[in-house]
């Protein structure tokens, strides 16, 4: 078992470097830990043709579980097409296989997954009650049999929140949540096509009880966070003028002892007011804590090509022990309407002794 993370005090003395090389208008100064990112474009996997979204979590049974929307899951062509489903993924890219476990709803308007987390022996999911491109709301779902069956919530998970304010990502802490620093789950929220991201924490046992949520307010001088139970007093935990679309991926990288956020963004040439905005750009950000302070690792416009890409993710199962090698996944439409992976490598400013 990898050692558990401790929250760190950090944020002073960050030197500003020239961020133009990362692409235009990165929202935070460059990382002082991760110098650069390189990609191996010679090997790319593509599975689950015709299905998008693909949030993932690493469970106690060592399997990677993924939620998909608007498709057939891992094996295209099976009938009927489902609005939301679950697949178990085995192996490590490029040698991976998938088994479809569950699906619900016809077509794409029953619902789609927003975030998935494995805690102890349960799989827990937030899903949106409709097409995720629109301003629908978060609902809950739980499985106690490794994804084979699910109990879906019938009421809004956050009734006090305005329409469209919903879960965008959950911090992933490794196999079965084993590297978590405490008993909380850290969850990011926001609106579609919006520059601001918000953070909440809640005890694991209260994940689906919104009355127990505490909302991020600010970072204290010692690097810790201040929280409030009052939803109306929450504050932005991350801001990017270029906005984002749909989902975020956040994980703790124990090899680097850093949190990594992977987030799509718009560029000046994109029409962010269009529901199917042609977004193909994304950034990677790092921080010592779930609340920051954030720095920029990578900020790229039109990643690889100008085809629509979204829901970028770095699964914790695919991190190397030293934290420097990883596999980046993403979905998209229509050419990337599947789950895709390429291998990435972080170069550090200073190697650890």
Image: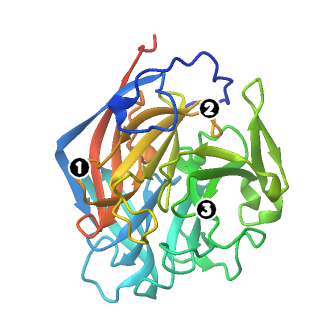
Seen as rendered, the residue at the extreme top is 353
Where residue 182 sits, quadrant-wise, is top right
Marks 2 and 1, how far apart at CA: 34 Å
Q: Relative to 325, does residue 93 appear above or below in the rendering? A: below
Coordinates of residue 9 in the picture (x, y in percent): 69, 24
Coordinates of residue 209 in the picture (x, y in percent): 77, 66
**Nearest-to-viewer mark from 3 and 2:** 2
Tell how many labels. Answer: 3
Coordinates of residue 178 in the picture (x, y in percent): 59, 43
Question: What residue lies at 39% left-to-right and 78% top-to-bottom?
Answer: 70
Report helix, strand or loop for mark 1.
loop
Crowd tier of the residue under label 1, counting other residues whose Cα lies within 10 Å: few below 14, some 14–19, many 20 or above: some
Q: Which residue is mark 1?
A: 94
Q: Earlier in the sequence, mark 2 or mark 1?
A: 1
Coordinates of residue 198 in the picture (x, y in percent): 66, 51
Question: What residue lies at 27% left-to-right and 74% top-to-bottom?
Answer: 75
Q: Relative to 39, does residue 172 appear above or below in the rendering? A: below
């Amino acid at each position: 078992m990898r050692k558990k993370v401790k929250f760190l005090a950090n944020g002073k003395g960050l030197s500003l470097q020239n961020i133009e090389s990362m692409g235009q208008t990165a929202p935070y100064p460059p990382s002082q830990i991760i110098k650069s990112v390189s990609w191996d474009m010679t090997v790319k996997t593509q599975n689950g043709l015709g299905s998008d979204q693909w949030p993932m979590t690493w469970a106690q049974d060592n399997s990677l579980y993924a939620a998909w929307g608007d498709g057939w899951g891992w094996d295209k062509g099976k009938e009927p097409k489902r609005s939301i489903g679950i697949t178990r993924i085995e192996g490590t890219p490029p040698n991976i296989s998938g088994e479809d476990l569950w699906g619900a709803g016809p077509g794409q308007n029953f619902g789609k997954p927003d975030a998935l987390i494995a805690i102890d022996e349960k799989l827990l999911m937030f899903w949106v009650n409709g097409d995720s491109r629109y301003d629908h709301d978060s609902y809950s779902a739980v499985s106690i049999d490794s994804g084979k069956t699910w109990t879906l919530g019938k009421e809004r998970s956050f009734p006090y929140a305005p329409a469209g304010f919903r879960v965008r990502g959950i911090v992933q802490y490794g196999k079965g949540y084993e590297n978590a620093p405490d008993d909380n789950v850290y969850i990011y929220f926001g609106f579609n096509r919006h520059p601001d991201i918000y953070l909440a924490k809640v005890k694991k046992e209260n994940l689906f009880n919104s009355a127990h949520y505490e909302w991020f307010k600010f970072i204290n001088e010692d690097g810790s966070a201040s929280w409030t139970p009052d939803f109306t007093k929450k504050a932005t935990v991350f801001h990017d003028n270029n906005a984002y679309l749909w989902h975020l991926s956040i994980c703790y990288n124990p090899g680097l002892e850093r949190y990594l956020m992977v987030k799509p963004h718009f560029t000046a040439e994109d029409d962010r007011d269009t529901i199917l905005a042609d977004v193909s750009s994304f950034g990677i950000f790092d921080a010592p804590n779930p609340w920051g302070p954030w720095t920029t690792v990578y900020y790229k416009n039109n990643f690889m090509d100008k085809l629509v890409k979204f829901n970028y993710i770095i699964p914790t199962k695919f991190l190397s022990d030293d934290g420097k090698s990883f596999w980046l996944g993403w979905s998209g439409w229509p050419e990337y309407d599947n789950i895709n992976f390429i291998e990435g490598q972080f170069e550090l400013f200073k190697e650890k002794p």
